[in-house]
Amino acid sequence: MATTTALPKDVRAKYEPVIGLEVHVQLLTASKIFCGCSNKFGDPPNTNVCPVCLGLPGALPVLNRKAVEFAVLASKSLGCRVNENSIFARKNYFYPDLPKGYQISQYDKPLAEFGTIEVSTEGGGQKKIGITRVHMEEDAGKSIHDGFVDSGSNTYLDLNRCGTPLIEIVSEPDMRSPDEAYEYLTKLKEIILFTGVSDCNMEEGSLRCDANVSVRPVGQKEFGTKAEVKNVNSFRFIREALEYEIERQIELIESGGKVVQETRLYNAHEGRTYGMRSKERAHDYRYFPEPDLLPLVVDEKWRKKIEATMPELPDARRERFVREFGVTPYDAAVLTASKNFADQFEEAAKAAKNPKRVANLVQSELQGRLKAKGLAIEHSPISMKGVAVSADLVEAGAISSKMLKELYDLSFERNKDFPVVYEEEGSPKQSTDTGALEKVIDELIAANPKQVEQYKAGKKTIIGFFVGQVMKASKGQASPAVVNELLTKKLEA
Ligand SMILES: [Zn+2]
């Protein structure tokens, strides 16, 4: 839903928004961060719990090595420096879904710092958004406020999520528009997905985002007072929430009011933010080092071992696709939409006789048909292997590009992969019967003396006219290479 305010453009232009984002990402480890309980999403409520994650007295946490490795990998993928020593700290607050009464997090000595994410700007340029820090922490449980008959009066608790390993990625306040924030989040999610440390599924809460936003008069150095927007569960809503919040703050200042520092919740149905009750605003977490855990040491040897498992990241892969397969940057972006898809494409392209032809077919034949059907490339009836098979057939001269187009159309009509349709159609072959072709060519040459004259006078491009006529006569079954060869021979004679 659109925002409810509508500021005059000139008023909006007097202010510059300043946006910083805090992103929580759940790590895909088999077990939780400080105990051996399963970290699987969607199990029956309160079945994956033990004394440690229930916060029972005397239970002690043991750090999950895999969680550290995933956190280091994510930090490096975001260009961060990983600190050899980091410290877990207790963040104290009371909430029903946090049975310990504190969350184990990291405070003044985080795992990693000083990263960047490069985003595209409206002007088509690139901009670096700083990442202040990446730290590790445990997730809290889940309070379920609706879905039960007595939800009006009761809240239910599912503590399965208690102790799920998280990383929090805190950006610098470097973003200047909701669009930049959207770009940053998209890029961040893409990078994390490529590393494989999280599924970044926002619906299941494995990627969550809070936004800090303030406005200041254009040209002013000091930041304005910020509000924190929480509870936003899609990138689109974050963009909308920021848009709303920026206008709200400008209106407030313009009418002589003051922005107060507070946490606000976004209501997606109404397209606006609401201030939380003041009681829930008070932050005094009384951080102190976690006495039950040793400092976390990631020495160079371990760090390098983790770094060695880093897959090729999306930007690098895109550049390589442009270089190796001669595709446009736009198509390289499509081909790397997900790691899985990029892997499929690359495997098929490399198995084909001419990898560039596979890329070309994806661009020229597949994309348009997908767009027309409104399908994402992952749901294409023609698989990447199918594209490779068709590319090889064209490469070998077995089918013409016209036949390929028709077979692609049939694949989309029947929702079947290319090799299946090719077989269903009786594995058609383009005609290489030179005898029949020669007859057609002789007739054409006899019927078009003027064009023959032009050819002989040096206008070699006129051959295109003859090729077109022969192809038409053969109903697209002839091989253009063979036709060309025969025509040249006859015209030169
Ligand atoms: Zn547990």
Image (cartoon, rainbow, N blue to C red):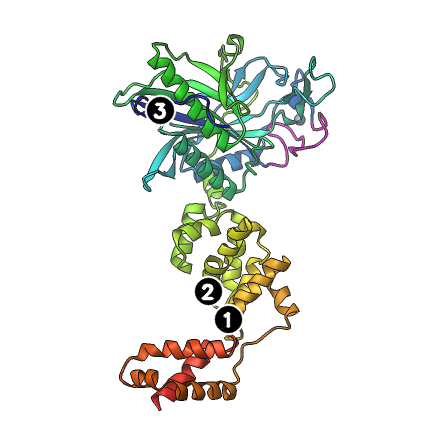
Mark 2: secondary structure: helix
Magenta highlight range: 29-48
| Amino acid of disc 3 | Pro
Residue 271 picture location, percent across and down: 50, 24
Could you tell me if the residues under marks 1 and 2 are in contact, i.e. CB atoms within 8 Å? yes
In this rendered view, identify the residue nearer to me: 318 or 266. 266
> Number of numbered discs present?
3
Magenta highlight: main SS:
loop
Q: Residue at x 39, y 17 (%)?
A: 249
Does dot 1 land on a helix, a strand or a loop? Answer: helix
Callout 2: 10 Å neighbours few (<14), some, many (20+)? Answer: many
Q: Position of residue 42 (x, y in %)?
A: 68, 33
- Residue 416 seen in this snapshot: no
Element type at marker 3? Answer: strand
- Contact between labelled residues 3 and 1, with CB atoms less than 8 Å apart: no
Q: Which quadrant of the figure contains the C terminus?
A: bottom left
Looking at the picture, which amino acid does disc 2 mark? Arg
